[in-house]
């Protein structure tokens, strides 16, 4: 069961996936921090159900209280390592913006590129769904001590596309865009890193195989890859 955060309260619910299913689209922001970024997306796109998930309920407490009347928005407390099965196959888009710790390790292809957590994140996606990741490159390049404290010794160089591709492919994700120096998204951390002139790597990946509940396998043709690439380019830019 999912723990929905409303201010300081956490309410267990199993009806959220059904609510999400009533919307044309669903966007999950995983590791959403203060939750303001996904809150603004919900406000701008009433046809999109937006779910901010963070391991720390206190991070989203204030925004979830302020935005509690927004029908197409919810915040949940969950670790990426234990995302509930009820969320499998619910998202058209999952964003993971400037994660740290175990979440960064998972989406950065750490753990020997064999991350069960990355598999769980991939399972959030609907067929043709998109995973968008923005990684703080300076953690890797300039701050080995901080990286070590965060348990990131094992993180491969995020600019090494082939290492990421291999890790993503293991969980059925195809990397269709991988770029150094993407604009930092307008999140709390994005703005902070922008002020510090930090660099970020952007990764966009598509689910290439159907999640179990969704029937057929997605065709892997070069044509479908090109089209997906074109769409994803704009979606990565739109995160800024
Ligand atoms: C550096 S902050 C970035 C927050 C936000 N995305 C932003 O850009 O402002 C990283 C966030 O990821 C969350 N986080 C870290 N590991 C996580 C995990 N395993 N599962 C869910 N959230 C996690 C933290 O609680 C924190 O809020």
Image (spheres, rainbow, N blue to C red):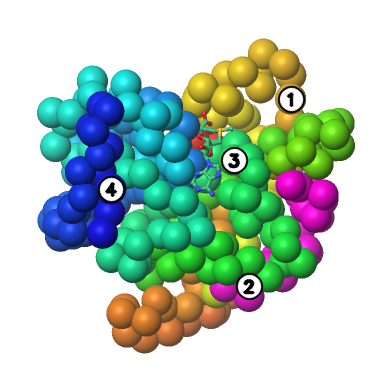
Q: What stretch of residues is rendered in magenta?
A: 151-171
| Element type where label 1 sits in the image | loop
Residue tagged 3: 99
Which of pointers 3 and 4 lies earlier in the amino acid sequence? Answer: 4
User: Residue 113 location in percent, x, y?
Assistant: 72, 67
Residue tagged 2: 169
**Quadrant that contains the N terminus:** bottom left
Which of pointers 4 and 2 lies earlier in the amino acid sequence? Answer: 4
* C-alpha separation, residue under disc 3 versus residue under disc 4: 21 Å
Label 4, ligand 1: CB separation under 8 Å:
no
Quick one: label 4, few (<14), some, or many (20+) residues within 10 Å? some
Q: Any magenta on residue 162? A: yes
- The residue most toward the bottom is 216
Q: Can you tell which quarter of the image residue 144 is in?
A: top right
| Element type where label 4 sits in the image | strand
Which of pointers 1 and 4 lies earlier in the amino acid sequence? Answer: 4
| The label number, if any, that marks residue 115 in the structure image | none
Which of pointers 2 and 3 lies earlier in the amino acid sequence? Answer: 3
Label 3, ligand 1: CB separation under 8 Å:
yes
User: Which residue is more in the foreground, 196 or 15?
Assistant: 15
Q: Nearer the viewer, mark 1 or mark 4?
A: 4
Residue tagged 1: 198
Task: Give the residue drawn at x 70%, y 59%.
Answer: 109
* C-alpha separation, residue under disc 1 versus residue under disc 4: 34 Å
Query: In this image, 141 relative to 178: left or right?
Result: right
Query: In this image, 151 relative to 84: left or right?
Result: right
Query: Is residue 228 something one can see in this rendering?
Result: no
| Element type where label 2 sits in the image | helix
94 in relation to 162, above or below: above
Residue tagged 4: 3
Q: Which of marks 3 and 1 is in front?
A: 3
Q: Any magenta on residue 154? A: yes
């Amino acid at each position: 069961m999912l723990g929905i955060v409303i201010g300081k309260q956490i309410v267990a619910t199993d009806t959220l996936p059904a609510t999400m299913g009533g919307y044309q689209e669903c966007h999950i922001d995983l590791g959403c921090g203060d939750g303001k970024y996904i809150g603004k997306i919900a406000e701008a796109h009433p046809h999109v159900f937006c779910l901010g998930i963070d391991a720390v309920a206190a991070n989203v407490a204030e925004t979830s209280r302020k935005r509690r009347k927004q029908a197409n928005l919810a915040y949940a407390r969950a670790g990426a390592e234990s995302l509930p099965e009820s969320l499998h196959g619910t998202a058209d888009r999952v964003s993971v913006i400037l994660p740290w710790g175990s979440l960064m390790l998972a989406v950065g292809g750490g753990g020997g590129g064999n991350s069960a957590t990355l598999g769980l994140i991939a399972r959030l996606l609907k067929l043709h769904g998109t995973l968008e990741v923005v990684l703080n490159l300076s953690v890797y390049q300039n701050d080995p001590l901080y990286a070590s404290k965060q348990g990131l010794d094992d993180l491969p160089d995020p600019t090494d596309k082939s290492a990421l591709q291999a890790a993503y492919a293991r969980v059925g994700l195809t990397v269709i865009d991988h770029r150094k120096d993407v604009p930092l998204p307008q999140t709390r951390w994005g703005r902070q890193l922008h002020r510090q002139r930090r660099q970020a790597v952007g990764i966009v990946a598509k689910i290439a195989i159907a999640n179990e509940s969704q029937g057929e396998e997605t065709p892997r043709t070069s044509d479908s890859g090109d089209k997906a690439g074109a769409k994803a380019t704009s979606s990565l830019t739109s995160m800024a």
